[in-house]
């Protein structure tokens, strides 16, 4: 069974750094792209970036380029999303999602990580 | 960020049919890219509902169907049930400006 299990909720202050994780199981991790999607409070879904674990090929949405960093650790089948300096506007739920094998969609999703940034 | 346009809300009584539109442009849906649909129940992660315009993943009831014409796609829910009350998002691919994966604005379906 394919599963993406994300790390727990975080409460941070503006300016702090953060790295959240997404652990994959039930499939060959390196062979499927993993994307990250933001959902701000009461808002829709926004694609942030995507990484191919086999070679760490990464594409960022222009809206998020330079704002976040996506990475993987192949040895533990885990993808990461990190910030070096959080802002209040980063408060949101962040989902990781596996891109489908043949189609440009997201077929499995993590449960989401709630990130709250407040002074 | 490029987005696909959906109506904010639709509603229907149990047993009725509701349809959600998803309007894109010549660089995404109109360019021939597939449209996918997700269902997001309150407080949960999105779930793939329809892929490649009109295909259902295993386990998705056939009450859900998708279609596409030109730069507009549609999701129909026939025989509406109380458990269908959720937010629905379309998604496609945009080959311009490196904004590859684009989502719709979302539609809240309310079962009256």
Image (cartoon, rainbow, N blue to C red):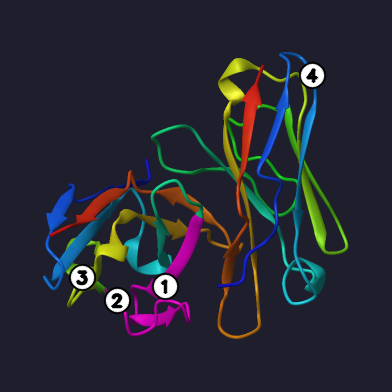
| Residue beneath disc 2 | A68
Q: List x then y, in percent, for residue A39.
A: 41, 54
Instruction: Characterize the local packing of mark 4: few (<14), some (14-19) or many (20 or more) Cα atoms within 10 angstroms.
Output: few
Q: Secondary structure at mark 1?
A: strand
- The chain holding disc 1 is A
Q: Are marks 4 and 3 on the same chain?
A: no
- The chain holding disc 3 is A
- Residue A12 within the segment the image draws in magenta: no
Of pointers 3 and 1, the one earlier in the residue sequence = 1
Q: Are marks 3 and 1 in contact (CB under 8 Å)?
A: no
- The chain holding disc 4 is B
Q: List x then y, in percent, for residue B23.
A: 77, 59
| Residue beneath disc 3 | A86
| Residue beneath disc 4 | B16
Cα separation between marks 2 and 1 = 9 Å
Say which quarter of the image contains residue A92: bottom left
Cα separation between marks 3 and 2 = 10 Å
Q: Nearer the viewer, mark 3 or mark 1?
A: 3
A103 to the left or right of A69: right
Q: Secondary structure at mark 2?
A: loop
| Residue beneath disc 1 | A49
Cα separation between marks 4 and 3 = 46 Å
**Residue A81 seen in the figure:** yes
Instruction: Characterize the local packing of mark 3: few (<14), some (14-19) or many (20 or more) Cα atoms within 10 angstroms.
Output: many
Q: Is residue B81 above or below residue A64?
A: above
Query: Magenta residues?
Result: A45-70
Q: Are marks 2 and 1 in contact (CB under 8 Å)?
A: yes
């Amino acid at each position: 069974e394919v599963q993406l299990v994300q790390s727990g909720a975080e409460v941070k202050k503006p300016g702090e750094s953060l790295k959240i994780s997404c652990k994959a199981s039930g499939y060959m991790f390196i062979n499927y792209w993993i994307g990250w999607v933001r959902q701000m409070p009461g808002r829709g879904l926004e694609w942030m970036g995507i990484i191919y674990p086999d070679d760490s090929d990464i594409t960022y949405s222009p809206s998020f380029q330079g704002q976040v960093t996506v990475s993987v650790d192949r040895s533990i089948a885990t993808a990461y999303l990190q910030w070096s300096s959080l802002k209040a506007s980063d408060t949101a739920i962040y989902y990781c999602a596996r891109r489908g094998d043949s189609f440009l969609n997201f077929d499995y999703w993590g449960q989401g990580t709630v990130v709250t940034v407040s002074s | 960020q490029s987005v696909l346009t959906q109506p904010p809300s639709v509603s229907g009584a149990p047993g009725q049919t509701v349809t959600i539109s998803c309007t894109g442009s010549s660089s995404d849906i109109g360019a021939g890219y597939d449209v996918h649909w997700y269902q997001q129940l309150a407080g949960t992660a999105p779930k793939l509902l329809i892929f490649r315009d009109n295909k259902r993943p295993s386990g998705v009831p056939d009450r859900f169907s998708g279609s596409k014409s030109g730069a507009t796609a549609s999701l129909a829910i026939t025989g509406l049930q109380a458990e269908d009350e959720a937010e629905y998002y379309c998604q496609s691919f945009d080959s311009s400006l490196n904004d590859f994966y684009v989502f719709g604005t979302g539609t809240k379906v309310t079962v009256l």
